[in-house]
Image (cartoon, rainbow, N blue to C red):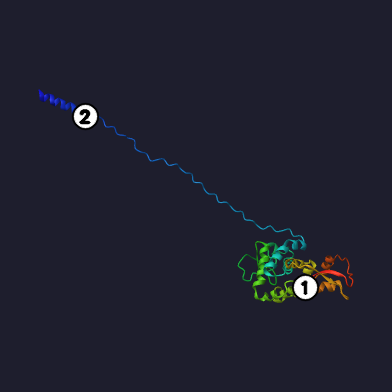
Amino acid sequence: MKKLLTLFIVIFLIQSCGSKRIIYNNKVDQPAKTKKVKKTKSKSKKTKSISFVSPRINSTEDYVNYYSHIAMDEMIQYKIPASITLAQGILESGAGKGRLAVQANNHFGIKCHDWTGKKIFHDDDEAQECFRKYDNPEFSYRDHSIFLATRDRYSFLFKLDIDNYKQWARGLKKAGYATDPKYPQKLIDLIERYELYKYDNKVLKKKNKTYRVKKGDTLFSIAKKFNMSIDYLRDLNKISGNEISVGEIILIIK
């Protein structure tokens, strides 16, 4: 009887232990959700290329007014008279209206030589010769200065007086800049007609000085003596005609 009771207790204990359920957490840890970052495409700013707009040149006076400051800058940096630079620009470019000036911004008729930049072909001494082409007329002015300053055949020019445009004009012909025998006189005529020497004087900061008229003096002889045009001498002294008197004090640029 005791054995049966003991067996019954053992069975009861086994069943009660087995009835307990072990609960497992079936939830699996999920990886943290990452926020999607929208990639923004960096928009590169497009830079607009600025093209040169040609000035409106209707006359030689317009040409001088527009390019005189450039010629004076070149004189300061390269010691070439502004009057000579302007006169060459007017003559070689037809005051900015010639084909080389309009289509190639070449104001000085400089040929290619050792040039590696843009080119244009134009009839000159021979058919379809190669000339330099620039993006801007100012580059043409700078190249003209460098052309004269760096070539041995023009080196003697820089030993001349910087305010003596007549010597410079003759020197350019002597160095072979142009083949036209009248080239020097054409430059001189332009300088005196449009009073381009005034821009040399501005750079050199020349001041007006006085001269006492002597016996035998004329406006022409005084103008020639001081390298001035008669018109400029008249304007400077408010003289309408040609009459001057011995002992009269007149203004000159020396």
Nearest to viewer (mark 2 / mark 1)? 2
x, y percentage for residue 164?
75, 73
Snapshot quadrant of residue 57: bottom right
Residue type for callout 2? Cys
**How far apart are the two marked residues, 2 and 1, measured between alpha carbons?**
131 Å
First-in-chain label (2 vs 1)? 2
Please state if 23 lies on the left or on the right of 111 as rendered. Answer: left
Front residue of 111 and 22: 22
Q: Around disc 1, counting alpha carbons within 10 Å, would you say few (fewer than 14), some (14 to 19), or many (20 or more)?
A: few
Q: Which mark is residue 102?
A: none
Residue type for callout 1? Gln
Residue 176 in sight: no
Snapshot quadrant of residue 52: bottom right
Seen as rendered, the residue at the extreme top is 1
Please state if 17 lies on the left or on the right of 5 as rendered. Answer: right
Q: Is 87 drawn above or below residue 15 in the view shown?
A: below
Front residue of 187 and 155: 155
x, y percentage for residue 107?
70, 66
Please state if 92 lies on the left or on the right of 222 as rendered. Answer: left
Residue 224 in sight: yes
Mark 1, residue position: 185
Secondary structure state at the residue bearing disc 1: helix
Instruction: Look at the numbered discs 2 and 1 and tell me whether their residues touch, using CB distance below 8 Å.
Output: no
Quadrant for the C terminus, please: bottom right
Q: Is 152 drawn above or below residue 77 in the view shown?
A: below
x, y percentage for residue 120?
65, 65
Front residue of 47 and 83: 83
Secondary structure state at the residue bearing disc 2: helix
x, y percentage for residue 239?
87, 66
Snapshot quadrant of residue 229: bottom right
Q: Is 83 drawn above or below residue 48 in the view shown?
A: below
Mark 2, residue position: 17
